[in-house]
Amino acid sequence: MILFVIFFGILIYVAFYFLGRTLCKKNNFLKKNANKSNAIILSVALIPIVMTVDREVLAYGFGYSLSPVIGAIITHFLVSSLFNKKKKKKTLFFNEEYYFGFAGIMLLSYIALLLPST
């Protein structure tokens, strides 16, 4: 049962990673604004929003805002190692594709705030 939950969680992160990549490639505004500084701003802005919505402490807000970062790193690593085998040249890990996928995972995090926490 635990393996199913882990697999389902990874599947949701991968789905929103690809959703973010697709949305950012098709929308010029998102393509231009999906970068490192906006990723940091969205992550930091998530902390007080989570604390307000879930009525929790600061540590909960930090953990909630750190989970999309860790999820995007793991998902980007899995996607780049499994699906991009034909690329032989070395590229930066935190490239444009990472920030596009990170935007999708941040979308998942903001949508998850609409779900009840208890």
Image (spheres, rainbow, N blue to C red):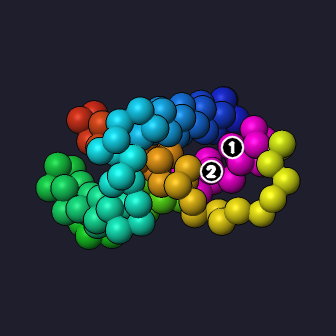
Q: Examine the structure image and report whether residue 76 is included in the region drawn in magenta.
A: yes
Mark 2: amino acid: His
Q: Is residue 28 above or below residue 22?
A: below
The numbered dot on residue 60 is: none
Magenta-colored segment: predominant secondary structure: helix
Q: Residue at x 52, y 55 (%)?
A: 96
In magenta, the rendered stretch is: 71-84
Mark 1: amino acid: Val
Q: Residue at x 32, y 62 (%)?
A: 38
**Quarter of the image with the N terminus in it:** top right
The numbered dot on residue 76 is: 2
| Front position in the image: 112 or 15 | 15
| Front position in the image: 22 or 10 | 22
Q: Examine the structure image and report whether residue 55 is included in the region drawn in magenta.
A: no
Helix, strand, or loop for circle 2? Answer: helix
Q: Residue at x 68, y 53 (%)?
A: 77
**Image location (x, y in percent) of residue 27:** 35, 36
Quarter of the rendering containing residue 7: top right
Q: Is residue 58 left or right of residue 31?
A: left
Q: Residue at x 28, y 65 (%)?
A: 41
Q: Is residue 116 left or right of residue 86?
A: left
Q: Is residue 58 above or below residue 54?
A: below
